[in-house]
Image: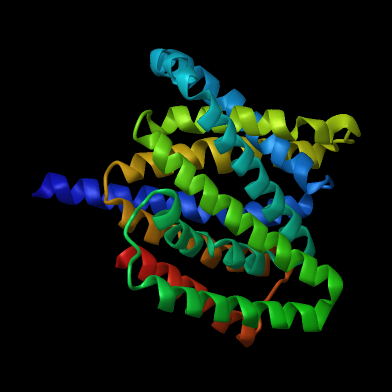
Amino acid sequence: MAKMSHKRWAGYFTTAMAATIWGSNGVIVNLIALDPYQIAFFRVFIASVVLAPFTIIFKWREFAEARRLLGFLLVNGLLLCLGWGFLFASMKLIPIANAVLINYLAPIFTAALAPILLKERLEKVIAPALFLSMTGMILISYDEVMSGGASNLLGIIYGLLAGLAYAGFIISSKRLREKISSPVIAIYSYMFAAIFLAPTLLETPTLQIQSLALLLILGSINTAFAVTLYFYGLGLIEAHRATVMTYLEPISAVIFGAVFLGQIPNPLVAVGGSLIAFAGYLVIKY
């Protein structure tokens, strides 16, 4: 019993730490003087380089055999590059906490699309969850549009597109996970996402030392390390419990945004964000 308790604690701790690390992504993105899609490229490229030795040493055979799923892996990489590209674009236009909260519509989108794409049963909780999450998004959108106009509206749209792309990535990854392990899915997704995003470098970016250092942190710590940490925790606790822990990301994003960028959410945004978080919790819990 004690051993199981220790594993559960380790699972909660590692998934919570990963989500907290991800909450700093918005601050890093805002401090890097590059196009959002160029930032997304360097994120997946650096993560690929960091994870490659692990894959070669421990997962080479599975990595090689996964080529039979090349089409699905290409789609996974495309969805990942779209999701992170849109999310970073959103973070450049609206407060990072708002962008992250809108992106967290992804679990609700996933639950709504899964019966169509995965032939899963439509749960009764989906309708109230969609209502709550859409109400929350409207509250956040209203505040952003009233305070910032067209550019803020574009930031909201980018956030929604990021959530939809990430929902597609979750569904695609779930299908792939039935055939190959999570680390192999991750390395293929990063590599293909980097290929899809490579054309953003046609306009050669000027990298200052600060931007280079932040990109290394984003790619190695916030992506390669944090994702590996999350996968480790996912192996110790139930998937729905691990997903609940990821809701620490928008909470930590609020804290990071307030401390480093002076972005203090107002009551309307706080209420809207709470509705989205609660809707996600309902979907995961039931």
Q: Looking at the rendering, in which quadrant would you find the C terminus?
A: bottom left
Is residue 265 in view? Answer: no
Asked if residue 122 is positioned above or below residue 179 in the image, the reply reads: below
Q: Where is residue 108 in the image (x, y as percent from the top left)?
A: 47, 64
- Residue drawn where x is 47% and y is 31% of the image: 185
Residue closer to the observer: 4 or 103: 103
Q: Where is residue 250 in the image (x, y as percent from the top left)?
A: 54, 64
Residue closer to the observer: 271 or 193: 193
- Residue drawn where x is 65% and y is 63% of the image: 160
Instruction: Name the colouring of the figure.
Output: rainbow
- Residue drawn where x is 67% and y is 56% of the image: 26
The residue sitting at the left extreme is 1
- Residue drawn where x is 78% and y is 79% of the image: 145
Is residue 184 in view? Answer: yes
Asked if residue 14 is positioned above or below residue 159 in the image, the reply reads: above
Asked if residue 104 is positioned above or below residue 182 in the image, the reply reads: below
Q: In this image, 30 relative to 33: left or right?
A: left
Q: Where is residue 184 in the image (x, y as percent from the top left)?
A: 45, 27
The residue sitting at the bottom extreme is 267
Rendered image quadrant of residue 281: bottom left
Rendered image quadrant of residue 161: bottom right
Q: In this image, 254 relative to 196: left or right?
A: left
Q: How many marks?
A: 0
Q: Position of residue 63 (x, y in %)?
A: 45, 18
